[in-house]
């Protein structure tokens, strides 16, 4: 890396990569060891912010450098994407940094919905059924990311299931 980009760019990308590695590692480790702690603390937000910062720094420092785009920028923007064996589709997994953030937001939203539904004295069965249908549709679709880059080709999400998405060119 040090022979292909300037020291300032190398150091900025290295620092952003180290921050992301630390934050993402802490979040994933916490999911395994104590999932409740992940939702109670800021680990998910921290790793998503670190991923965003890594992407920003990489785009800023490498985006206009065709000589390093393939070797350095691609692995960053393709983090967590799982290509099909024929290369015609990608899977965006539930553990993608932005998916983790969305999953936490949806969990909090669902908890609030349940709290309000249980605590309301005025909720009708019909109203609760309609509200539940709306919540179900929200939780069935994953919003982030909707478009990803793989092999310098844009892929768009076409199908969602259990936090995973299928993307095609």
Image: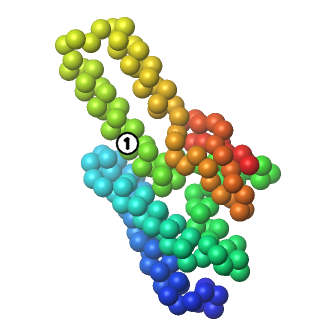
In the image, taking residue 147 as reference, residue 142 lies left or right, namely left
Residue 143 at what x, y percent from top left? 52, 42
Q: Is residue 6 above or below residue 78?
A: below
Asked if one can make out residue 111 in the rendered structure from this viewpoint, the answer is yes
* Residue at (64, 36) in percent of width and height: 159
In the image, taking residue 93 as reference, residue 16 lies left or right, namely left
Residue 117 at what x, y percent from top left? 27, 20
* Residue at (50, 68) in percent of width and height: 56
Residue 166 at what x, y percent from top left? 65, 42
Asked if one can make out residue 71 in the rendered structure from this viewpoint, the answer is no
Q: Is residue 19 above or below residue 150?
A: below
Q: Is residue 3 above or below residue 51?
A: below
Residue sitting nearer the eye, 57 or 21: 57
Circle 1 Cα neighbour tier, 10 Å, few/some/many (<14 / 14–19 / ≥20): some
State the image quarter where residue 133 is shown: top left
Number of labelled discs? 1
Q: Specify the quadrant that holds the N terminus.
A: bottom right
* Residue at (45, 67) in percent of width and height: 53
In the image, taking residue 131 as reference, residue 115 lies left or right, namely left
Q: Is residue 103 above or below residue 85?
A: above
Residue 108 at what x, y percent from top left? 32, 38
What residue does disc 1 label? Answer: 105
* Residue at (43, 43) in percent of width and height: 103
Outermost residue on the right side: it is 86
Q: Secondary structure at mark 1?
A: helix
Q: How is the image coloured?
A: rainbow
């Amino acid at each position: 890396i040090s022979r292909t980009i300037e020291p300032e760019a190398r150091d900025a990308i290295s620092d952003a990569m180290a921050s992301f590695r630390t934050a993402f590692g802490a979040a994933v480790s916490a999911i395994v060891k104590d999932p409740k702690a992940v939702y109670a603390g800021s680990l998910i937000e921290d790793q998503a912010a670190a991923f965003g910062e890594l992407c920003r720094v990489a785009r800023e420092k490498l985006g206009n450098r065709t000589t390093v785009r393939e070797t350095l920028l691609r692995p960053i923007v393709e983090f967590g994407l799982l290509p099909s064996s024929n290369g015609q589709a990608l899977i965006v997994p539930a553990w993608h940094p932005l998916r983790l953030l969305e999953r936490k937001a949806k969990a909090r939203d669902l908890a609030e919905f349940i709290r309000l539904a249980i605590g309301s004295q005025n909720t009708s069965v019909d109203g609760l059924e309609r509200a539940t249908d709306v919540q179900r549709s929200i939780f069935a679709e994953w919003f982030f990311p909707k478009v990803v880059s793989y092999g310098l080709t844009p892929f768009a999400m076409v199908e969602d299931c259990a936090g995973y998405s299928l993307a095609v060119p």
